[in-house]
Image (cartoon, grey):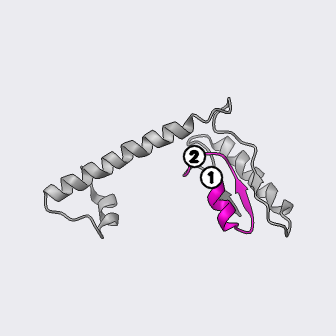
Amino acid sequence: MSISTVWDITMAVKPPRACFIDFPIGSPIGKPHMPELQRQMLRSIFAEVGKFTPDWKMHELPFQWSEDGSRAWEEELKELYRRGLGTVAAHVADHSRRGEALIGQEHAFAVRCNC
């Protein structure tokens, strides 16, 4: 079972059993710290398993990120990525000034960097 948050990519790849949820990338099972909603979503996903037929079709799940159906999360996510890229660039620049190369050291950087 594939849970997708990106319609176009899933349509191109066509995994055998795909459920689409219109949530931000990286959050296919909902917001953090909402275990009951996450359990409800998982139950819904498992209920879809028996509904797949040999003809490929992506199943859409009925959940919304915002109670009012707003897609404001798209701009929030874009801003988060913009800030995140700036943070990564700042880390790379800081390590470069100290003569440390990060290329090939990504895992170590993620584990030990406290800057």
**Residue located 19% across and 52% down the image:** 94
Q: Is residue 1 magenta?
A: no
Tell me the element at label 2: loop
* Quadrant (top left/top right/bottom left/bottom right) for the N terminus: bottom right
User: Viewed as shown, does residue 9 lie left or right of 17?
Assistant: left
**Mark 2 and mark 1 in contact (Cβ < 8 Å)?**
yes
Can residue 114 be seen here?
Answer: no
Q: Which residue is mark 2?
A: 24
Magenta span covers which residues? Answer: 5-25
**Residue 5 got which mark?**
1
Tell me the element at label 1: loop
Residue 31: image quadrant is top right
**Residue 16 got which mark?**
none
Question: Which residue in the rendered view is the most extreme toward the left?
Answer: 98
Instruction: Give how far apart the Cα atoms at labels 1 and 2 are.
Output: 7 Å
Looking at the rendered structure, the kind of residue marked 1 is Thr
Around disc 2, counting alpha carbons within 10 Å, would you say few (fewer than 14), some (14 to 19), or many (20 or more)? Answer: many
User: Viewed as shown, does residue 56 lie left or right of 77?
Assistant: right
Around disc 1, counting alpha carbons within 10 Å, would you say few (fewer than 14), some (14 to 19), or many (20 or more)? Answer: some
Q: Is residue 9 magenta?
A: yes
Measured from the top left, where is residue 50 in percent x and y? 85, 62
Looking at the rendered structure, the kind of residue marked 2 is Pro
**Residue located 76% across and 43% down the image:** 62
**Residue located 67% across and 57% down the image:** 3
Measured from the top left, where is residue 47 in percent x and y? 81, 55
- Mark 1 or mark 2: name the one nearer the start of the chain: 1
